[in-house]
Amino acid sequence: METSILLSTKKMLGLGAEYTPFDLDIITHINAVFSVLTQIGVGPTAGFAIQDETSKWQDFLSTNDTMLNLAKTYLYIKVRALFDPPTSSHHVTALKELTAEYEWRMNQFREEITPWTAPA
């Protein structure tokens, strides 16, 4: 299984590893999604960004395989919607609903790992 964040995302987008004309676009979208994941409490608290194909999924999140699998799919869906948006409004709606569900599920996993407590 591909562990490079960029290369695995490109593969899911249907692009070969050697095809690089859109790498900057894809990296920009990946980093935007990592910002969203950081805001919902997934991944390193200081945030996370990639520069090239050397960043691995284990660098982003290594402690919870279930959360990592959700994060990978979430990232792909969001990058796909930004990079190559679907033309069908039904497809757009389905992707929005799926990303909302994944955000909720990742939030649930995060709360199980680090429960929220009210400020004093």
Image (spheres, rainbow, N blue to C red):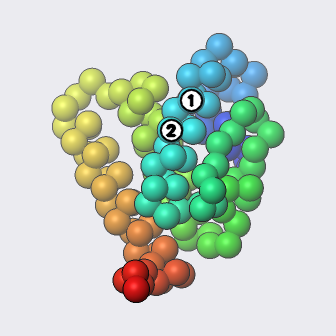
Q: Residue at x 39, y 33 (%)?
A: 81
Give the residue at the far right of this rendering: 54
Q: Residue at x 43, y 60 (%)?
A: 40
Q: Secondary structure at mark 2?
A: helix
Decide if residue 103 is in sight here.
yes
Q: Position of residue 69 (x, y in %)?
A: 56, 61
| Amino acid carrying mark 1 in the image | Thr
Give the residue at the far left of this rendering: 89
* Residue 71 in the image: above or below residue 76: below
Within 10 angstroms of label 2, few (less than 14), some, or many (20 or more) residues? some
Q: Secondary structure at mark 1?
A: helix
Residue 89 appears left or right of 67:
left
Q: Residue at x 72, y 28 (%)?
A: 17
Within 10 angstroms of label 1, few (less than 14), some, or many (20 or more) residues? some
* Residue 49 in the image: above or below residue 63: above
Q: Residue at x 27, y 24 (%)?
A: 87
Viewer-proximal residue among 95 and 47: 47
| Amino acid carrying mark 2 in the image | Ala
Which quadrant of the view contains residue 108? bottom left
Q: Quadrant of the C terminus?
A: bottom left
Instruction: Name the residue beneath numbered marker 1.
Output: 28
Residue 48 appears left or right of 101:
right
Real-space CA distance between mark 1 and mark 2, rounded to the nearest whole angstrom: 6 Å
Q: Position of residue 20 (x, y in %)?
A: 69, 18
Viewer-proximal residue among 14 and 5: 5
* Residue 19 in the image: above or below residue 41: above
> Tag on residue 107?
none
Decide if residue 11 is in sight here.
no
Instruction: Name the residue beneath numbered marker 2.
Output: 32
Q: Position of residue 46 (x, y in %)?
A: 63, 56
